[in-house]
Amino acid sequence: MDSLDLIVIKVTPELISDAKQWTNFVKNSRTIKQTKENPEDDLTGALGELAFLQIYPDSIRISHQDKEADFITKEGLRVDVKTKLRKNCVEKDYNVTIALYQKNQNCDAYAFFNYAEDDQCIEFVGILEKIKFWKNPQIIKKGEKYSNGYTCSMDCANLTVEQIINVTAKLTAKPTFVRASVISSKDIFPSI
C-alpha cells in the first residue's frame, strides 16, 4: 500500500513517562469503563492527547475535569481525541472508530491518532467535525467481525482512514479552528 503523508510523532521514553503522568488524574466515567479491563488504553489515550497538544499547543486540556471532550482550542472548539493502538502504521483502508454510546457527547470535533506500537510512533490521521463523522458512518455491532477478523467489543461507528485524510488534506498542514458562528463550518470542515 502507498505510504501515507501524515504528521508523525516519535514515541520516546520521555514521552511514555509524560503519558503516564498525564493519566494521573481522576478519570472520567468513559475512561473507567475501558481501563479496568485494558489498562494500556490509558497510555494509548494519553499519547494521543500529548500528540494533539504538540500539534495544537494553544489548546487547553479539559479531560481531567470534563467527561465530554479532551481539549478546548484557543478558538473555543471542544475536541475529543481518539487514539487507536495498533501494531503498525495505518493504511488507507483502516478504520477510525467511535463507540455508539458517545454519539451525543458534547464536543465539536474529533482528532484521530494511531499509536503504532511496533514502530513506536503516533500518527495524526486527521480531524473531523462531529456532525460530519455521524453523517454516514459504517456501524459495526458488538460481536460482529471487521474485515481484518477483529471482533468488535461494543457497538461502534467507523469511517476509513482514507475518508478522514481526504477531509484533513483540504485543511492546512496545521489546521486552524474558527468557530462556526464566525464563518461557515464548510470553510473549516469540507464534506467527505
Image (spheres, helix red, strand yellow):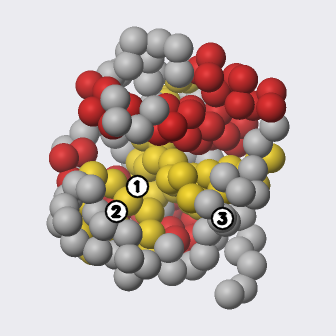
Instruction: Judge whether residue 182 can be spotted in this image.
Output: no
In this view of the protein, which residue sits in the foreground, 21 or 101?
A: 21
Q: Are marks 1 and 2 in contact (CB under 8 Å)?
A: yes
Q: CA distance from mark 3 to mark 2?
A: 24 Å
Q: Residue at x 46, y 47 (%)?
A: 82
Q: CA distance from mark 1 to mark 3?
A: 26 Å
Q: Locate residue 12: give its quadrant.
A: top right
What residue is shown with label 2? 133
What residue is shown with label 1? 129
Dot 1 amino acid type: Glu
Looking at the image, how many numbered discs can be counted on the residues? 3
Seen in the picture, residue 76 relative to 150 is either above or below; the reply is: above
Q: Residue at x 37, y 69 (%)?
A: 150
Q: Earlier in the sequence, mark 3 or mark 2?
A: 3
The C terminus appears in which quarter of the rendering? bottom left
Q: Locate residue 149: give its quadrant.
A: bottom left
Q: Residue at x 80, y 32 (%)?
A: 13
Question: Label 3's element?
Answer: loop
Can you tell which of label 1 and label 2 is closer to the viewer?
Answer: 2
